[in-house]
Image: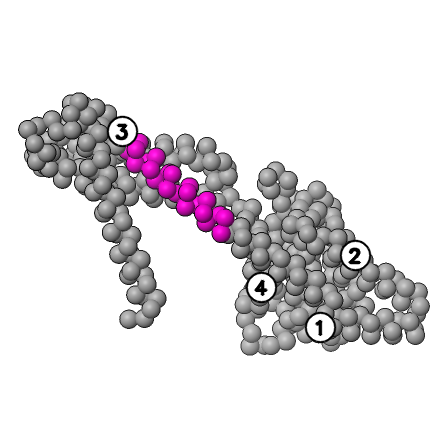
Amino acid sequence: MNKTALGKIRKSLKVTVTVISVVLVYDFFYLMMFNILHFDNFYPGDTWRNDIPLFINNLVPISVLLICNLLIVSAKWKGTVIGRRLSLKITTDAVISFIVLYLVNITYVFVAEHTGLNPKVEWPGTILCNTLLLMGVEIFYYVKRSKAAVIQSEKNKREAMQYRYDALKSQVNPHFLFNSLSILYSLITIDQTKASKFTLMLSDIYRYVMRIRDKSLVPLSDEMEFIHTYIEILKVRFGEAFQVETVNESSAEEGLLIPYSLQLLVENVTKHNIITKDEPVKVTIAVSATAVTISNTLNPKDKTQNTDSVSGFGLKYLAGQYGMYGRQMDVNNNGKTFTVKIPILWKEQTI
């Protein structure tokens, strides 16, 4: 048996033992509290032994309610209003929980009537029992989620710092500088006007990188202006072999993006595809009210490589960052075209 399978077994055993322990402790606690409220005594009978049958009878319904509440509270509501609003989430959990309680009770009555058991249900007691269970599960879930959020936040901060450093490094790395300076030198000897324009574009690239290095979100309009400058530099390098078309650019100027989102995706096109006069690559940047879609024709440098796997740290980082805002990046490869759709964020979604 491998370590992964053994780890899963241990985790399952730990969860099972924890659930059983919680049920036993809660059953005892609930029974004592019910006796005090109902009979004004810990043991309404002569001794505690008289409560043993009731204790045993409560194990199954408490277990069912606990498991149901765990499933209800841990339900994923990503990308919905319920998932974004705590008060609405708790209200929804409560409504579903008590619907389940009602179904459990009427199921018990049905089974009891057909098996000779006592079909009577103590509704106040079961409502109290379920309320306490739901409260306990809600508290446990949100404490656990808060701890996970703190850990994830620290991880995101580290990744964001690493990503910004990599983005800056990618613009000033020797390869990028060598290509840019080589192009600049050629232009100086051929066309000084184009050389001046190229120098200004290069300075705009570095100015933008330095200006937004500490920002977690940037306006779509700024990112589009930056990517146009970056594309112009690439066009000087690749000529007509690198074709770019922008569609509906003004659809969502007030939207926000993760910094360098577009530059990263365009850079990936040049990294992983052959771009020559005989084998040109066409890139389309389509801006809608909800997303920016970048697609490119495929002509991979490594014909055996699955383009879907060419995500690297950059795309994984972007997916994680957009995931923090409850949004998802879509990546699709149909063998001829590679497409990435990144969601446009709005101020109300980032608060």
Q: Which disc, if any, is residue 128?
A: 3
Image coordinates of residue 151 in percent, x first then y, are 49, 52
Find disc 2 in the rendering and name its residue: 207
Which mark is in front, 1 or 2? 2
Instruction: Give how far apart the Cα atoms at labels 3 and 4 are.
Output: 50 Å
Query: Is the C-beta separation of discs 1 and 2 under 8 Å?
Result: no
Amino acid beneath label 1: Ile
Task: Compare marks 3 and 4 and give the one earlier in the sequence.
Answer: 3
Q: Of the numbered discs in the image, which one, if any, rests on residue 3? A: none
Q: Amino acid at mark 4?
A: Phe
The amino acid type, in three-letter code, at marker 3 is Leu
User: Viewer-nearest of labels 4 and 2?
Assistant: 2
Residue at point 53%, 55% (across, down): 155
Residue at 49% across, 48% down: 149
What residue is shown at x 19% (from left), y 33% (from top)?
31
Instruction: Indicate the secondary structure of the residue bearing disc 2.
Output: helix
